[in-house]
Image (spheres, rainbow, N blue to C red):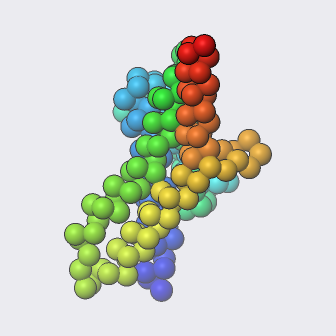
Amino acid sequence: MLDLFLFIFILLPFIHLLHELGHIIFARLFRVQHTKIVLGAGPKWFQFTILGTKIQWNTYYMVGGYSTNEQNGTLSPWKQALISLGGPLFNVLAVICSIPFITASNVNMMTAFIFFNGWIGLTNLIPFKIGHKCSDGWIILSCIKEEFQNWWKRRK
C-alpha cells in the first residue's frame, strides 16, 4: 500500500517534471526566455520561479503536466522539433541512468519508475492530435514536414 501511495503522489509527479524539464532545458538552449512548467490539473495550488522558469503546482499534481515557452520572434522548425524531443529524451535518459540503481530492496519502485518513464517517453513520440493538444511526436513530425516543404521550395 505504501508503494502505491509513493508511486502516485511522489514518483508520477517527478516523472512528469522530468519530462517537462527536458522541454524547458532544450528551449533554454535556444535562448527561449519565457518558460513555464505546469504540473497537474485543477485549481492552482502554488507557483514559484526558479532560474527564470515559472513552475506551477495544481491541486491534482499527479495527473500529468505540460510546459510552455514563448519566444520573441519565431523559432526554426528544427529548433521546435528539438524542444519537443527534449521531454521524451529526458524520460529515456532517466530509464538508462536508473537501471544500475536497482537493488533487491527497491526493485518494485525502480521497476515502476523505469516502466512509467519509458511509457511516457515513448507514447509522447507517437504523433497524435486531440482538439488543440498535440503530442510531442505530432509537433516533431509537423516540424520535419515544414522543413522539408521549405527545402523543396528553395530547391525549385
Q: Residue at x 47, y 43 (%)?
A: 85
Give percent across and percent down for residue 15: 44, 59
Q: Residue furthest front?
A: 156
Q: Is residue 92 visible?
A: yes
Q: Residue at x 55, y 59 (%)?
A: 123
Return the x and y of residue 115 as percentages of the image width and height.
44, 70
**Residue 152: quadrant of the picture:** top right
Measured along the vertical axis of the image, is residue 82 above or below residue 99?
Answer: above
Q: Is residue 16 left or right of residue 60?
A: left
Q: Is residue 36 visible?
A: no
Q: Position of residue 145 (x, y in %)?
A: 60, 33
The foreground one among 37 and 30 is 30
Q: In the rendered view, would you say 42 is above or below 22? A: below
In the depicted structure, whether residue 78 falls above or below residue 155 = below
Viewer-nearest residue: 145 or 81: 145
Which residue of the protein is positioned furthest toward the right in this rendering? 131
> What residue is rendered at 39% in x and 69% in y?
114
* Quadrant of the drawing holding the C terminus: top right
Task: Give residue 62's quadrant in the image.
Answer: bottom right
Left or right of 36? Residue 94 is left
**Pick the front one: 133 or 48:** 133
Q: Residue at x 30, y 61 (%)?
A: 96
Q: Is residue 126 left or right of residue 95?
A: right
List x then y, in percent, for residue 138: 62, 44
